[in-house]
Amino acid sequence: MSKAYGSASGRCVKALQPLDLDIDAGSFVAIVGRSGCGKSTLLRMAAGLETPSSGTLSINGSDGVKSVRYVFQSYGESLLPWLSVAKNIDFGLRHAFTPASSQRTGNSHDRASQIDRLLNEVGLPGTAALYPSELSGGMQQRLAIARALASGPEILLLDEPFSAIDALSRASMQDLMLRIWQERRITIVFVTHDIDEALYLADRVVVMGEGGIGIARDLPVPIPRPRDQVATRETPEFLRLRREILELVLGGAR
């Protein structure tokens, strides 16, 4: 599929030239590349927020977006500031994909139990009565992830979700994301500028070419799991892949 936009001058601007990409169910795929290469455009089309100019998007053999949730980079803007932590997650429960996890099928005690479980899952116990403004940036992103998980998605799309938080919080969030993925076995597509982050998290790294030319390289990441923030980053395979991807990105990945 591809994506083009009309400019104010009437010209056609190609945001993403035609590409083919298959993602296995239950896999963790990272997408890297320079700014303006089409990473977010690709993710937004997968989320149904943008319509491809040509080509098709198929999920589980069907056209259209099904059982997909999108976690934005600007977590503070995606949360509902007038609602408490608990009510932000309750919003996710009310828009669940599966009736079994929907608020409409359970009483308030059932919903409160689900909210407590989700808060514990993302490391936010005891925060249900707080408001987003009372949380740190890392905690707000945990809340955004919990709300996305509340709907029971099969596919989770994340666009630079940890870029605005400090390095230590980022490492903690990376390990949280790996734990969620391993326990839930959902499909995760993760856009990042951070090559080390991509290699630490993913089974596969898709390198996008500069200027929206499409996929320059699709690399498997044969690094054993479970992974460790220190030991994994020191392995020869990690260092080899890091060098290869860095050279691709700096060279324009054409």
Image (spheres, rainbow, N blue to C red):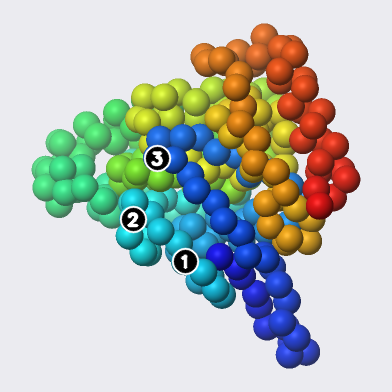
Name the residue nearer the viewer: 54 or 126: 54
Q: Are marks 1 and 2 in contact (CB under 8 Å)?
A: no
Numbered tag placed on residue 171 in the rendering = none
Numbered tag placed on residue 56 in the rendering = 1
Residue visible at 37% across and 31% down? Answer: 185
**Which element type, helix, strand or loop, lies under badge 1?**
loop
3 or 2: tag closer to the N-terminus: 3
Q: Are marks 3 and 2 in contact (CB under 8 Å)?
A: no
Disc 1/disc 2 C-alpha distance (Å): 11 Å
1 or 3: tag closer to the N-terminus: 3
Please state the horizontal and vertical placement of residue 25, each as a whole percent of the image: 40, 40
Q: Residues within 10 Å of mark 1 (few under 14, many from 20)?
A: few
**Which element type, helix, strand or loop, lies under badge 2?**
loop
Disc 3/disc 2 C-alpha distance (Å): 12 Å
* Relative vertical location of residue 139 with respect to residue 75 in this rendering, above or below: above
Residue visible at 68% across and 83% down? Answer: 6
* Relative vertical location of residue 57 with respect to residue 245 in this rendering, above or below: below
Find disc 2 in the rendering and name its residue.
Answer: 61
Name the residue nearer the viewer: 25 or 82: 25
1 or 2: tag closer to the N-terminus: 1
Please state the horizontal and vertical placement of residue 82, each as a whole percent of the image: 42, 55
Q: Residues within 10 Å of mark 3 (few under 14, many from 20)?
A: some
What residue type is disc 1 on?
Answer: Thr
Find residue 152 and report its image quarter: top left
What residue type is disc 2 on?
Answer: Gly
Q: Residues within 10 Å of mark 2 (few under 14, many from 20)?
A: few
Q: Quadrant of the N terminus?
A: bottom right
Numbered tag placed on residue 25 in the rendering = 3
Please state the horizontal and vertical placement of residue 147, each as a whole percent of the image: 38, 44
Find residue 86 and report its image quarter: top left
Q: Is residue 253 left or right of residue 193?
A: right
